[in-house]
Amino acid sequence: MRIAICDDEKNIRELIGNKVAKQYPEAEIVFFQSGEELLLSDKHVDILFLDIQMSGRDGMETARELRKKDKSVILIFVTAVEEYVFQAFDVGAFNYIVKPIDDTKFVDILCRAVDEWHSQDTNVREPEANYVMINNGGVHTKVIIEDIVYAEVFNRKVVIHKLDDEIEYYGKMSDLEAVAGDSFFRPHRAYLVNFKYVEKYDATTIYLEKGTALMAKQNYPDFVKKYMKYNQRKG
């Protein structure tokens, strides 16, 4: 079992490392002092303690990038500001710890994370569907990424179109684009489309199973190239 700690403060890295070692002396503990260092590492991590507020690439951005290549890591955020907690679940966080760290809560979360790691059987488990949590007026809605037909910016809101529903919220299209993955393409600054639902297209418009999206002419060659790659992946 490999447990990683990513924090730009050396004393916090050592504090968490000592707590982990005390509870699980058999675990391999690795340290990263920045999000960049973590993302460049080729070591697979089973459990990750990730600070949100770091200089350079912050923890939330680091988590989004990490999820693109590793959806199995059990992610525990460490933060001094509790307001970031709601964003944590957008990237599939297992739990979070608020600084200053309470020993009892830390041990409880760590033990539950280890239990979760033991229960994982990658040979038989279905991979969990990638999703985002949308906050609209205090109501948090889980949206499966694959179910999004397209998203558009309208009246300063992002509107997510599914085959059977529409969800709107105040947010940035770039944030949704960052977690959507390579099955999506942004043909126009106001649109993000899912290749899965594309029925036909030309240099100005993408026609989907539900609705249409505008195509910026300068993005058309890149769209065609990536759509072809998507179809090759899907056979």
Image (cartoon, rainbow, N blue to C red):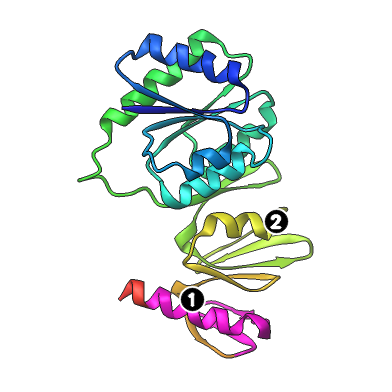
Helix, strand or loop at label 2? It is loop
Q: What residue is at 49 percent from the left and 15 percent from the top?
A: 106
**What amino acid is labelled 2 in the image?**
Lys
Quarter of the image where the C terminus is located: bottom left
- Place of residue 19 in the rendered image (x, y in percent of width and height, measured from the top left): 46, 12
Q: Which residue is mark 1?
A: 226
Q: CA distance from mark 2 to mark 1?
A: 23 Å
User: Is residue 75 left or right of 158 when viewed as pictured?
Assistant: left
Q: Please give the range of residues in magenta.
A: 203-231
Q: What residue is at 25 percent from the left and 43 percent from the top?
A: 122
> Where 214 sits versus 28, above or below?
below
| 22 or 56, nearer to the observer | 56
Tell me how many marks there are.
2
Helix, strand or loop at label 1? It is helix
- Place of residue 141 in the rendered image (x, y in percent of width and height, measured from the top left): 56, 47
**What amino acid is labelled 1 in the image?**
Lys
Q: Which residue is mark 2?
A: 172
**Magenta segment includes 13:** no
